[in-house]
Image (tube, helix red, strand yellow):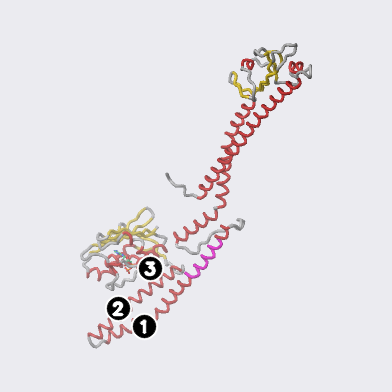
Amino acid sequence: MKKITSIKTRITLWYTTVMFVLIAFVLLLVGTLSYRLSIENIEKDVTLQVTQVSDRFGKDPGVFQSVDNGKDFKNVSIYEMNGKYITGQYIYDIANIEFSEGKPRRETVDGKEYIVYDMKKHGMPGGNHRGFWIRGVESVNSTILFGRSAFAVITVIIPLILLMTAFGGYYITKKAFLPISEIIRTANEISEQSDISKRIIINPETRQDELYSLSMTLNNMLDKIETLIMQEKQFTSDASHELRTPISVILAQGEYLLDIAKDEKEKELAENIVSKSKQVSSLISRLLFLARADQKRQKLNTEKVDIDVIFDIAIENVTELAEKKNITIIKNVSDDIIVNADELLLLSAVTNLVSNAVKYGKMGGMIEISAKKHNTSVVITVKDDGIGIEEDKLDKIWGRFYRTDDVRNDEYDSYGLGLPMVKSIVELHGGTICVKSKPGEGTEFEITLY
Ligand code: ADP
């Protein structure tokens, strides 16, 4: 059976059940007690009337008259010892019940219930000394009928009360839990949109209860986290900015040293300086881009861009490496595909993907880059038949400085900042990017621009 996970439903179910048990218990108790009490009252009444008649017998000659007309004794009749009716409130059916002394008892005649109390009396009016029976009888049918109709009413009322309790309770709990729904919504927004500036909306009219305090505390905590993240981003941005000038100087001087190198040894050293400076310079540019994008300072110079041209330049940028690995690059662009984009950024994104396809492609392999229109959107794919990515790492490749273990080497200038940058560029354009890959078979990146 499926477990109920909603706290609201669990609470509602809990107190509705408790309510049901409680109401059923109280009604059962009250019902049984009042029924017992009514029966006891009838028994007392019948016993009293019979005893009074018995006590007045011999002392008050008018007692038979009172029994006869039923004025004082509505429920008493007098019978001879053989059961023959003499006087009183004659109840025909009751005469057939055997007489017996003792306590008041329950008798059923033709499906109707009675309380019967018999008392044997010696002597007899009129000088006959055989004795006689004084019988008190009262019907309990009205009590039982009342009990039954009360039960019928209760069977309608209990479900009604329970329904009201369940709906009312659910409504109140739902209202009380609204701040929690708001907290969940905000937390989801923060994680889905990676936007730490979102806050829990607190209605100023809400009661200042524990959930109100929780919302306030979480908002304060988010304020602190946002400040820390902003400081860290500012630091990355400032540090990258500060490093740009010295690295340009080192690169320029390295190139100068390369020009004036006297022998192979000096040339090799200068080449090393130039290549490493270029790597660091590219790393700094990527860091600066990401910091600007994080701070929402990265501007888009949108214009009409021909995807075919972008592909040509991207292929050109990686030709040298592709030739070294004997990789064939196939371009596949259907029609003229023109998109509104920042040309330099889009080129950088496509170049990154094609360059990765070459870096992680197999020797003598093949890369296919294609673009096609899909309704109003444009889908760009870069597909290789290289080493592929294991499934558990597919989510991680978008993280900054992430590289899979098998490529952690210095063979390429690989820092794990390429894909985060591509993702950021695509998102700046309002697009999406996804990846499909199988280890040993290849990888396919797909950008959709809307
Ligand atoms: P890097 O500069 O290391 O290439 P990226 O951010 O571009 O950084 O890529 C992150 C990691 O994702 C790479 O180190 C590599 O492990 C993996 N990766 C990216 N593209 C491919 C691909 N086409 N085939 C296999 N692995 C890839």
Amino acid tagged 3: Arg
Judge from the rendering whether residue 229 lies leftward or rightward of residue 416; answer left or right: right
Query: Which percent across, then down, holds residue 101?
Result: 64, 21
Disc 3 packing (10 Å; few <14; some 14–19; many ≥20): some
Per the image, the residue denoted by label 3 is 400
Q: Main secondary structure of the magenta part?
A: helix
The image shows residue 154, relative to residue 103, as above or below, that is below
Observer able to see residue 312: no
Judge from the rendering whether residue 147 lies leftward or rightward of residue 390; answer left or right: right
Per the image, the residue denoted by label 1 is 249
Span of residues in magenta:
215-229
Foreground residue among 74 and 252 = 74
Residue sitting at the far bottom: 262
Foreground residue among 179 and 3 = 3
Choose top left, top right, bottom left or bottom right for residue 19. top right
Amino acid tagged 2: Ser
Amino acid tagged 1: Val
Query: Which percent across, then down, holds residue 389?
Result: 29, 62
Mark 2 near mark 3, Cβ–Cβ under 8 Å? no
Disc 2 packing (10 Å; few <14; some 14–19; many ≥20): some
Does 218 lie within the magenta span?
A: yes
